[in-house]
Image (cartoon, rainbow, N blue to C red):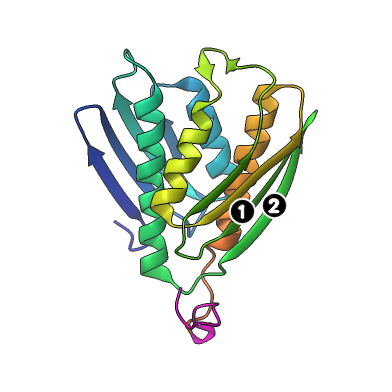
């Protein structure tokens, strides 16, 4: 296994999740959470972010998809946190704006070791297929907490919930690649404190 791959596994009574992340190269993307719409969003994130990602997840979706969506965010966030710890210093900051038809998404990240989420996204339709759109905030909250990033998500307009969320995940992927890009060790951590 490559030294660039970060692997994280989490098993609880509610979910079982395995994530393999390689930010160093565009490569294999295989997403299976048993939630097709969520798979579509995560695939778009990795594809447009230009990194390799495998997610195998299952859980008590017969009760509610909430646990599975949230725990996927926790595990994926942990993978990025471990990447931060292993490969710092990183570029730290990233911003990207992506349109999709009627929708526009802005994503800004500070990979600063201080988790904070600003989520200014509303969905005209409550569901896309059989997926409840409110679950996406749970994913981003969990990801932010475990990745220890400052994440601002803003979709100022859009008429179609699918377009809004897809623009959001594409921009999220691009911004992750920017902020988690490795920089020269001589640069040190990009903080006036000298430590993130």
Answer above or below: position of 32 versus 96. above
Q: Is residue 95 left or right of residue 34?
A: right
For label 1, the crowd category at 10 Å Cα-Cα, with few meaning under 14, some 14 to 19 and many 20 or more, is many
Q: Pointer 2 and pointer 1: residues touching (CB < 8 Å)?
A: yes
Q: Mark 1 points at which residue?
A: 175
Residue pushed farthest right? 102
Residue 68 picture quarter: top left
Q: Is residue 188 magenta?
A: yes
Q: In terms of depth relative to the viewer, which is nearer, 13 or 80? A: 13
Disc 1 element: helix
Q: Which numbered disc, 2 or 1, marks the residue that appears first in the sequence?
A: 2
Q: In terms of depth relative to the viewer, which is nearer, 3 or 192? A: 192
Q: Is residue 191 magenta?
A: yes
On residue 96, the disc is 2
Mostly what secondary structure, the magenta segment?
loop
What is the tally of numbered marks visible in this picture? Answer: 2
């Amino acid at each position: 296994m490559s030294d660039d791959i970060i692997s994280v596994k989490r098993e609880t009574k509610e979910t079982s999740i395995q994530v393999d992340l390689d930010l160093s190269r565009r490569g294999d993307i295989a997403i299976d959470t048993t939630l097709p719409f969520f798979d579509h969003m995560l695939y778009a994130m990795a594809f447009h972010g230009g990194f390799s990602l495998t997610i195998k997840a299952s859980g008590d979706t017969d009760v509610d998809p909430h646990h599975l969506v949230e725990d996927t965010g926790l595990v994926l966030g942990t993978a990025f946190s471990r990447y931060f710890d292993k490969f710092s210093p990183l570029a730290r900051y990233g911003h990207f704006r992506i349109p999709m038809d009627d929708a526009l998404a802005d994503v800004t990240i500070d990979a600063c070791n201080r988790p904070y989420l600003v989520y200014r996204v509303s969905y005209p339709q409550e569901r896309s297929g059989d997926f409840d759109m409110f679950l996406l905030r749970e994913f981003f909250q969990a990801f932010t907490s475990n990745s220890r990033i400052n994440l601002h998500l803003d979709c100022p307009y859009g008429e179609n919930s699918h377009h809004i969320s897809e623009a959001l995940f594409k921009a999220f992927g691009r911004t992750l690649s920017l902020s988690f890009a490795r920089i020269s060790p001589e640069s040190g951590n990009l903080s006036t404190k000298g430590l993130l």
